[in-house]
Amino acid sequence: MNTPSKKLGFCTRAIHGGLEPDPGTGAIMTPVFLTSTYVQSEPGKHKGYEYSRSGNPTRSALEANLASIEGGNFALAFSSGLGATNTVLNLLKSGDHVVSGDDVYGGTYRLFRNVYEQFGVRFTFVDTSDLDALRDAVTPETKLVWLESPTNPLLKITDLSAASEIAHSAGALCCIDNTFASPFLQRPLELGSDLVVHSTTKYLGGHSDVVGGAVVMNDPEIRARLAFFQNAVGATPGPLDCFLVLRGIKTLGLRMRQHCANAARIASYLAGHSRVEKVYYPGLATHPGHKIARKQMSDFGGIVSLEVKGGLEAARKFVSAAEIFALAESLGGVESLIEIPAVMTHASIPAAERRKAGLADGLVRLSVGIEDVEDLVADLERALELSGG
Ligand SMILES: *Cc1c(COP(=O)(O)O)cnc(C)c1O
């Protein structure tokens, strides 16, 4: 079972991919190697591990498993999604240009604008669901195209095969933040992208009990450069965090099926509600990216965004009135969450930029969990009624 063929089904790979029973004891679960250092038999002679920032067996197991489920040759694990993103950005130097989606995770935007711009890396933000806009934005200096699809929180869809081709024709790498879809629904490396980034905090961990990140890739040279930065910069995860992500991945397929089924039901319920102005969900036939989502994803995910009638004031009442939907940032756990991006997850993006990207102040984002969907619909029904009062 060490490197299962890519032909094995997703759930089989999620449970077994890259993993072996512990050779010393037969333990079926990967041991948590809580050690910082490793004894050497002679100076410089060791069993592959010297120091746990450079390598740890629990982390190695997670990395092998992540590579298997994303259909990539290599993966590297990090202490957070932003730690993973930062390590990809370490590939750049002053004067390089990046084209980024204009609706990316708020912390990604903050890292680009408030950290990398001061080092002379230049960024252009465009709506990458419009391939002509992407084509116009790349230049000979463009070294990286950074995309999310579906985006956060507007759930815009970019054609990932076409976007990868545009990046490659400019000589740039194409990196997809695949956190929202998870590899169960979408595998960007199979669609031509060079790098996949994850916040494993979300669907991969799946239980809101760990913060982590990952980069998955095929090219051994890129892998070697990123592994160098992983050790040199040091945003590495602890072994217990690696164990929690590995454990979460085992049920990813089951959870994603339920997240998608619940989200689809909630999206169609909201679309027919008189107090709802607009619903954003790629599974709705009216969504502008629906056809492309059908082509490149196996289902439409667990995130639904909506605008309630009455703007920010009504949105505040709505999110406060919900009970099963907990008012919190983050997403992708088994429990349903509700939030207002403009004042919570995306507050670090200036208001003018947010509005330009189409993010209304009163937009509400739901991370639909795997509770009984009738209970979730009843909770929203009650909260919507109270949003008008
Ligand atoms: C949460 C998130 C991140 C950042 O990950 P952390 O683990 O919080 O550092 C990046 N991208 C997306 C799409 C996210 O949802």
Image: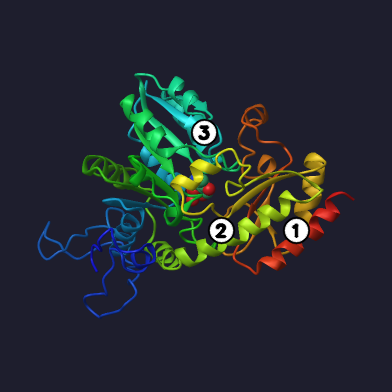
Find disc 3 in the rendering and name its residue. Answer: 129
How far apart marks 1 and 3 lie (CA) works out to 30 Å
Which residue is pictured at 62% across the width and 40% down the height?
A: 346
Q: Of label 1 and label 3, which has the lower sequence position?
A: 3
| 320 on left or right of 332 | right
Estimate the x, y position of residue 57 in percent, counting from the top left: 28, 64
Q: Is residue 126 above or below residue 370?
A: above
Find disc 2 in the rendering and name its residue. Answer: 260
The quarter holding residue 228 reads: top left
| 127 on left or right of 7 | right
Q: Of label 1 and label 2, which has the lower sequence position?
A: 2
Q: Which mark is residue 380?
A: 1
For the N terminus, the quadrant is bottom left
Tag 3, which secondary structure?
A: loop
Which residue is pictured at 72% across the width and 52% down the height?
A: 270
The residue under label 2 is which amino acid type?
Cys
Furthest residue toward right: 389
